[in-house]
Image (cartoon, rainbow, N blue to C red):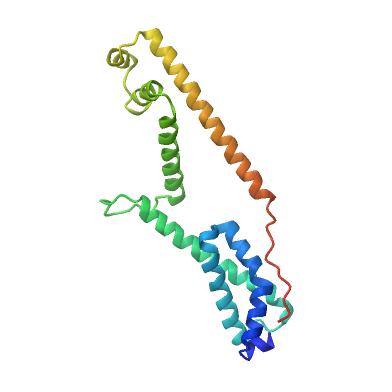
Amino acid sequence: MERIHTGDSAACEELYSAAFPDVRRWFSHRLGVQYADDRTHDTYLATIRAIINGDPREPDRLPGFIHVIAHRHFGSSVRSLRQSRFREIAPDNLTLLDPACDLDRAIIARERRDWVKRALCALPPEHREILERFYVLEQTSEQICREMELTETQFRLLKWRANAQFGALAKKRLQGQALQRLARRAVPRNRLTPDCTS
């Protein structure tokens, strides 16, 4: 740390090699690889600036100090991502936004709508049409039978098959989400304690 404090560039490189590969992995797990390099670089620059200014005072506190700086950059990244996502999902003609609007719920709702559209597209055309007419357009069974030229029995059978197929797709999706959650839990969480005595 004394060498970094005096502006030794070799010591700065040693610190980066020793501590920041773990920092980059930490950001990758939380923000994705597309943001990891920038946030790691920001954390590194903030750490170097702090050391030059005399923080932390004791070398053995450096790993925890880097951890705190990384968390700050992570928090600011999450805030900016939430704001950009909010701008993505907000209607163009919306002039006044409800401050009580829950952004997370809006994002989840949009993701669900997108998944339902993809799932409907995966169904045979006749199954897709009957589900769209009944659940999306809220047409009556009599109207659907008349327009699709079905008997009441054909309608019930077709609707049952379409629901079963859609349910199978939903079950498959939920199983995939459960596997993703298990995989995330299996990843070690506190990799951000590098040994560095630069």
Image quarter in which the N terminus is found: bottom right
Please give left or right for residue 45 compared with residue 61 in the image: left
Instruction: Tell which of 149 and 49 is nearer to you.
Output: 149
Q: Residue at x 54, y 35 (%)?
A: 173
User: What is the total number of numbered labels drawn onto the structure image?
Assistant: 0
- Give coordinates of residue 38: x percent, y percent: 51, 68
Q: Residue at x 69, y 61 (%)?
A: 190
Q: Residue at x 39, y 50 (%)?
A: 101
Image quarter in which the C terminus is found: bottom right
Q: Residue at x 38, y 13 (%)?
A: 155
Identify whether 44 is placed above or below 99: below
Identify whether 17 is placed above or below 3: above
Identify whether 149 is placed above or below 137: above
- Give coordinates of residue 152: x percent, y percent: 37, 9
Please give left or right for residue 3 compared with residue 91 in the image: right
Seen as rendered, the residue at the extreme bottom is: 6
- Give coordinates of residue 16: x percent, y percent: 64, 75
Please give left or right for residue 162 compared with residue 73 in the image: left
Instruction: Tell which of 4 and 67 is nearer to you.
Output: 4
Instruction: Tell which of 86 and 23 is nearer to you.
Output: 23
- Give coordinates of residue 115: x percent, y percent: 45, 38
